[in-house]
Image (cartoon, coloured by chain):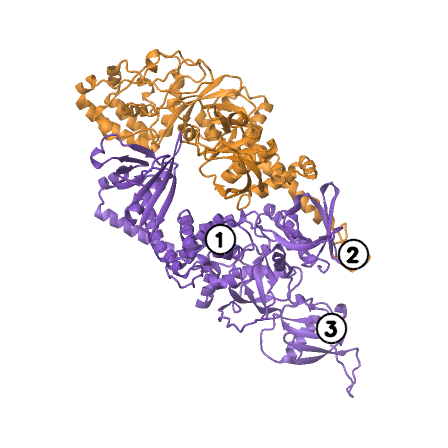
Chain colours: A orange, B purple
Amino acid sequence: MILYLMNNLPCKNVSILNNFGAGALFSQSLGVDILPPPDPKPPRVEFNYSVGFKDLNESLNALEDQDLDALMADLVADISEAEQRTIQAQKETPQKQPHSASLCVPSFSGSTSLGYGTNVAATSQYDDDLPPPPADPVLDLPLPPPPPGPISQEEEEAQAKADKIKLALEKLKEAKVKKLVVKIHMNDNSSKSLMVDERQLLARDVLDNLFEKTHCDCNVDWCLYEIYPELQIERFFEDHENVVEILSDWTRDTENKLLFLEKKEKYAVFKNPQNFYLDNKGKKENKETNEKMNAKNKESLLEESFCGTSVIVPELEGALYLKEDGKKSWKRRYFLLRASGIYYVPKGKTKFENVNIYYGIQCKMKYKAPTDYCFVLKHPQIQKESQYIKYLCCDDARALSQWVTGIRIAKYGKTLYDNYQRATAKAGLASRWTNLGTVNAVPPAPPSTGVKTDPTQANGQLPQATQSMNTALGEDWRHPETTKDKKPGPSLGSHDPGAPREKKNQEM
Amino acid sequence: MAGMKTATGDYIDSSWELRVFIGEEDPEAESLTLRVTGESHIGGVLLKIVEEIKRKQDWSDHAIWWEQKRQWLLQTHWTLDKYGILADARLFFGPQHRPVILRLPNRRALRLRASFSQPLFQAMVAICRLLSIRHPEELSLLRAPEKEKKKKKEKEPEEEVYDLTKVVLVGGVAPASFRGMPAHFSDSAQTEACYHMLSRPQPPPDPLLLQRLPRPSSLLDKTQLHSRWLDSSRCLMQQGVKAGDTLWLRFKYYSFFDLDPKTDPVRLTQLYEQARWDLLLEEIDCTEEEMMVFAALQYHINKLSQSGEVDEPAGTDSGLDDLDAALSNLEVKLEGSAPTDMLDSLTTIPELKDHLRIFRPRKLTLKGYRQHWVVFKETTLSYYKSQEEAPADPIQQLNLKGCEVVPDVNVSGQKFCIKLLVPSPEGMSEIYLRCQDEQQYARWMAGCRLASKGRTMADSSYSSEVQAILAFLSLQRTGGGGGGGSGNHPQGPDASAEGLNPYGLVAPRFQRKFKAKQLTPRILEAHQNVAQLSLSEAQLRFIQAWQSLPDFGISYVVVRFKGSRKDEILGIANNRLIRIDLSVGDVVKTWRFSNMRQWNVNWDIRQVAIEFDEHINVAFSCVSASCRIVHEYIGGYIFLSTRERARGEELDEDLFLQLTGGHEAF
């Protein structure tokens, strides 16, 4: 994927300028344009930023007082509305010759220390569905230091503007808007680019957005998938994770990419909870019964595990291979999963708060792992080979899926179930649309409204699902009562010495 | 009217003499002799008795208990014939509600009047209403364990028994709230104190006492408790409970419905207490680290309840608060607090600048701490060779967002270090900051903690964080240091009034493993993570952590499976039955209630037979507890699982009794 993020800017002033991009009015006059290079290898991942310096004077002129005033008014009025207009403006000017503009305000360089990681961000606009325009070679050059000449001529004006900018900056800070454009690879080697805004873009929102763009079947298995080619690890995002936050951890020259694909593992636990909760260390009889578990029992098992006062983490223990502290050897250790962390003997413990769980790919080749069923615990910010990454290796695929899922449950708790329910609601809605044959008639709504309407859709869908479950169970529970009249009551058993067994029908 | 006689005094009707003892089951009680016939109604007999006694008293609670049949004669319209009462019947005319002493989950004793005539289930509903505990179906009573004969003549300290026998509840309506407690508690100072005992957590127990209390050493020991449960479908009288007896009140079914800190202060507190004692008495296992979290929560909860920071439901106080707020508002208005200051404080983010000694562990270097000029701004830490070089590029700049902050403190050794594990794309950078004194340490530590969560020192919690760290350090001085001299011996509860005695907070096996001065820092460390919680939040967190323990909520019974020659353990949890090997403790097999088709009890041979889906049949006889108890557990859990859908406070008592009741029911 390509991520256009104003990252570690050599010239901090540029970043300030780019903040204005968030304001609708500037989308045209400033048109900070970020042009991706032609991709020689499609999967290549790039952090790219580029700001043109061709007509600095022109852009300075563009930033007139009234523009600043307008920006302020805009920011103060309603940030989210401004947002919408940005998107709109973006759509209205798809094919225009890209303007390249930049501005440096010298009075700023000392007073602000905005940098990567605070709240500075970049926006860029170009039409989503169009192939990226050919790159301008100039833009790919490293940024030259800002030419001081033209600025000194307008020092006074700049000073006055600086104050306004400062104020605007504070407003922006309050809004804490961080935006970036994300390129997501599809499974058919194509890719889509999305504008991502920190405040609303959870992985779920991105997925919903992609559903609209791709007209896929919207089933719950679709996920955003993060791949680290260098470390040979990958994982799917949980729906509640903030995409912007995760992507901010990637380095600028990263090869990491983001995929949009289906993964059965994502919600496997909710489809077949018995494989995770009732697995009796692979005993034969259990496996047989497990495969036949009916939907009603699954529901009750899920309700039990996820809807109590505290989430029940599957009981998991067993021997795994561990590679840690940057050592090359794999040691077999006995592991135990608890809600408070993963423990192993001889003594060791890892909490999940600060690590994400990844699948290790071809660890047998790369690290001489005993098997290919590896998972990896890594701090999200670590991007390179490090002794702080823990590699674990299971005996078989079943164990791998149990451990990974178990750890996810311990780490995320009920959120996982909430995510699943939202995903099912979404999928249910989508399939209903398909049935009505209106899927093509549905206008592709702007992403922000899609996000807004989502909760109501969820509300419309969820109760139905739970209701049907409730009635099914309710009937069952009432069963003993209704049969009471026909059958001898439980008390009869004792009075009648001939029938000492007391029958109670508990069909469940 | 029975007792017609001729002039000579001979009875000419079929009447006979019925002797009724007055009072509770006491053979020397005064007795009355009435003339009755078989057609006399119980109501009439009652009336006659009262007339005969000639004492003015409220007799409404009195009823007749038939000793031989162990039965109350509560159907006043029934005749003596219908009950089958003859002249030889030993009848006692006594109150239906009698005082018992309840040993609560918090180990305090409470005397109250319980119904001796209703099924225990109904009696529990009434008791819980009195104690204002919702969902009485989750609780039940146990017989108190038989007291071991004391070898030494130890003086048991006089124990305070709270008394609620005089409190009368108006039937029907839910108790209204008054002055932040149910109205019936607010009548006198005594009952008020009782409510506080119920709704506020107790201080940690004396560690010495904790060591003396019996603890289960094996699974077998854990089965003992469960043999003492009383039967829910029979009344106390029928189960041989006498007035003034001591009974234990406990949460029996580990399925707590709709736990709400706002409406359930008593329930939450008692549940917390039960969980706490479960952990302290090693009824349930946990890891060392989990124990530290539990200890920290106990410490925190105790501190809050001692300091009176109880989040009382908004009662009359809220009015005062409003007034206060209005006054301070007015004050601000009059003084006209400068808006510029406000803006400044909002926009300027405080920073820390100081000389600190820094150590960066690297391979193949022997360098120790070196003095640097360190600037901490927003969430970023930069350090320079000296203050003069500060405007230039720093030696290193670290963004602490998402980093791990580990204190490395030894108060007596005057060592105040902060270890930072800062994530970066290349891995973690390890860096140690060494502060000169407590004050400096507290400021920097608080900054690091906030920064690791992505917050700056402008955050409103900064100053409280600094205070918390200072308090933590001063506690280390008093708490940890005090235990040093006495070695491994636990200190009495009064060893340090303000400080913390870690031995009252952890299970005895950790007391043996660690010295107090080793425990204190670990507990305080864990405390840092929970220090912001309110009382009820902390209690809830404690209960949740307890619930996530793998062995949570399993009641153990010794059984013998059909076809097996040895005793095994049956674990009963809210969703499953577990067959456990008695000697090793391994889980042999798990059956889930959701797969259960039916269960039958053969009362004659004390055998429970269960049929699961796919024609799996299981049968076992109960060894350690009566099969009633096992049967009631299973039925009880199934009853509880129906609640989810019923929604609401209404209890389907019939269903409960039908599911749990045995052959005596109905």
| Mark 2 element type | loop
What amino acid is found at the position of numbered circle 3 in the picture?
Ser
Residue at numbered disc 2 = A500
The amino acid type found where label 2 is placed reads Pro
Locate residue B111: give its quadrant: bottom right
Badge 2 local density, few (<14 within 10 Å), some, or many (20+)?
some
Tell which tag, 1 or 2, sits nearer the viewer. 2
- Which residue is disc 3 drawn over? B40
- The image quarter containing residue B73 is bottom right
- Which of pointers 2 and 3 indicates the residue nearer the eye? 2
The image shows residue A88 at horizontal and vertical percentages of 39, 21
Q: Is residue B184 above or below residue B368?
A: below
Which of disc 3 and disc 1 is earlier in sequence? 3
In 3D space, how far apart are the residues under numbered discs 2 and 3 (Cα atoms)? 36 Å
B630 shown above or below A421? below
Element assignment for label 3:
loop
Q: Which of B24 and A254 lies nearest the eye of the viewer?
A: A254
Please, is residue B90 above or below residue B601 in the view? below
The kind of residue on which mark 1 rests is: Thr
Image coordinates of residue A64 in percent, x first then y, are: 24, 21
* Distance (Cα) linking label 1 and label 3: 49 Å
The chain that hosts pointer 2 is A
Gap between marks 1 and 2 measured at Cα: 45 Å
- Figure quadrant of the C terminus of chain B: bottom right
To which residue does mark 1 refer? B263
- In the image, residue B360 above or below residue B125: above
Residue A407 is at least partly visible in this image: yes
